Amino acid sequence: MTYMNNLEEFTRLCASRFSCRSYTSDPVPEAVLQSILQCVRLAPSACNRQPWQFVIIDTPQMRSAILEAYPRQWLENVPLFIVACGVHSQAWHRPDGKDHTDVDVAIAVEHICLAAGAAGLGTCWICNFDRAVLARAINAPDDIEPIAIIPIGYPAMAEPEKTRKSISEITRCGKF
Ligand SMILES: Cc1cc2nc3c(=O)[nH]c(=O)nc-3n(C[C@H](O)[C@H](O)[C@H](O)COP(=O)(O)O)c2cc1C
């Protein structure tokens, strides 16, 4: 593994990523978007099925369509959205039937958020949207499920304090 060998920097990246709910309207440079998409395509997935599609939304008309599915004033400035979609028919299903689409797409979405954070951009996971309205806006075929909307832009807010459980609250030695 030829990673940058800088756990400290990665820890700082994880600590500094936050749900950004205020953005400037400054555009995201195309080269930065391409680097983010490179990080997305490198995400792991169960059996390497890569059961995903990412819809890039950067026109005023499509941005308004997205906002109909999740109307929030704090999203009005956002220059770019990615709608992360799962393709259930391509996903690995465990022998007991569990569909891994959501797991795979979640990993890819967090790659987006961390890559964007590394470029000084803000993001926010959004899942509380109107699914039917969003699916219609992006013309999603029946087997493609929009799973998350990710706004991407330069933050117009300071990093808030993080509230998290402690390591001891979320880990167990060996068993429950
Ligand atoms: C799967 C998922 C869905 C989320 N959906 C929304 C959402 O619809 N709207 C929103 O404002 N934040 C949403 N969030 C953001 C969370 O509220 C946020 O990550 C959490 O409170 C921790 O804060 P932080 O991201 O600033 O560290 C979502 C986060 C995740 C992981």
Image (spheres, grey):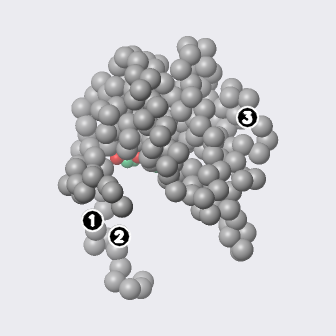
Mark 1 is on which residue type?
A: Ser
Amino acid at circle 3: Ala
Disc 2 and disc 3 in contact, CB within 8 angstroms: no
Front position among marks 2 and 3? 3
C-alpha separation, residue under disc 3 versus residue under disc 1: 40 Å
- Cα distance, mark 2 to mark 3? 37 Å
Q: Quadrant of residue 2?
A: bottom left
The answer to whether 115 is drawn above or below residue 168 in the figure is: above
Q: Is 91 drawn above or below residue 130 in the view shown?
A: below
Task: Report if the CB atoms under discs 2 and 1 are less than 8 Å apart.
Answer: yes
Q: Name the residue beneath numbered marker 1.
A: 166
Crowding near the residue tagged with mark 3, few <14, some 14–19, many ≥20 C-alpha atoms within 10 Å: some
* Residue at the (73%, 34%) spot, across then down: 140
- Mark 3 lies within 8 Å of ligand 1 (Cβ measured): no
Residue 32 at x, y = what percent? 40, 29
View quadrant of ligand 1: top left
- Percent position (x, y) of residue 31? 41, 26
At 64% across and 35% down in the image, what residue appears? 130
Disc 2, SS:
helix
Residue 140: mark: 3
Image quadrant occupied by the N terminus: bottom left
Instruction: Say which of 22 and 89 sits in front.
Output: 89
Spatial CA distance of label 2 from label 1 is: 7 Å
Report whether residue 19 is seen: no
Please name the residue that numbered disc 2 is placed on: 170
